[in-house]
Image (cartoon, helix red, strand yellow):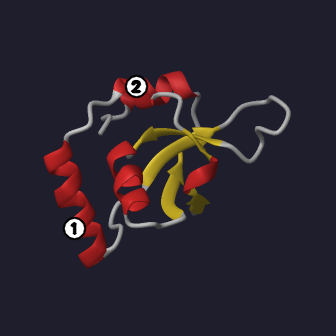
Amino acid sequence: MELEIAHLDRKYEELHIEDRVKLGRLTASLLEHGQKAPVLVVGGGAGEGEADRHVLVDGYQRVRALGRLGRDLVVAARLEAGAQSSLDGAQLR
């Protein structure tokens, strides 16, 4: 599925260390080849207005790189698990 980057909930962003060299390489790769792997998201929750929100659990670097390229959309795969269990099983990038 494709999601708007602006609508992603990035509440776990502070858990990720930004590597500027890797981000530059990834940005160049996305520009040349496009997005090959989806980011992983879980549903946003049961609160009002959260039905369409998705919490990003894996793919923070890809989202940053796509943002650098001025892209509005990201290819995502939705996990059918709670955010915590997704974080326990996801390799954070």
Q: Position of residue 41 (x, y in %)?
A: 53, 43
Report the residue at 50% width, 56% height from top.
Answer: 76
Find residue 28 and name its label: 1
**Which quarter of the figure has residue 50?**
top right
- Compare residues 19 and 51 and report the one nearer the observer: 19
Query: Residue 85, percent across and down?
Result: 49, 24
Gap in angstroms between the C-alphas marked 2 and 1: 24 Å
Q: Is residue 20 left or right of residue 10?
A: left
Where residue 89 sits, quadrant-wise, is top left
**32, above or below 24, in the image:** below
Q: Position of residue 86 (x, y in %)?
A: 47, 30
Query: In the picture provided, is 70 more to the left or to the right than 72?
Result: left
In front: 44, or 63?
63
Q: x, y (%) of residue 1?
A: 57, 63
Position of 53 with respect to 13 (left or right) is right
Count neighbours of disc 1 (C-alpha within 10 A) and say few if under 14, some if 14 to 19, many if 20 or more. some
Q: Relative to 79, is 46 above or below?
A: above
Indicate the quadrant where residue 90 lies: top left
Tag 2, which secondary structure? Answer: helix
Q: Residue at x 29, y 39 (%)?
A: 93
What label sits on residue 14 in the rendered view? Answer: 2
The tag earlier along the polypeptide, 2 or 1, is 2
Q: Residue at x 60, y 59 (%)?
A: 4
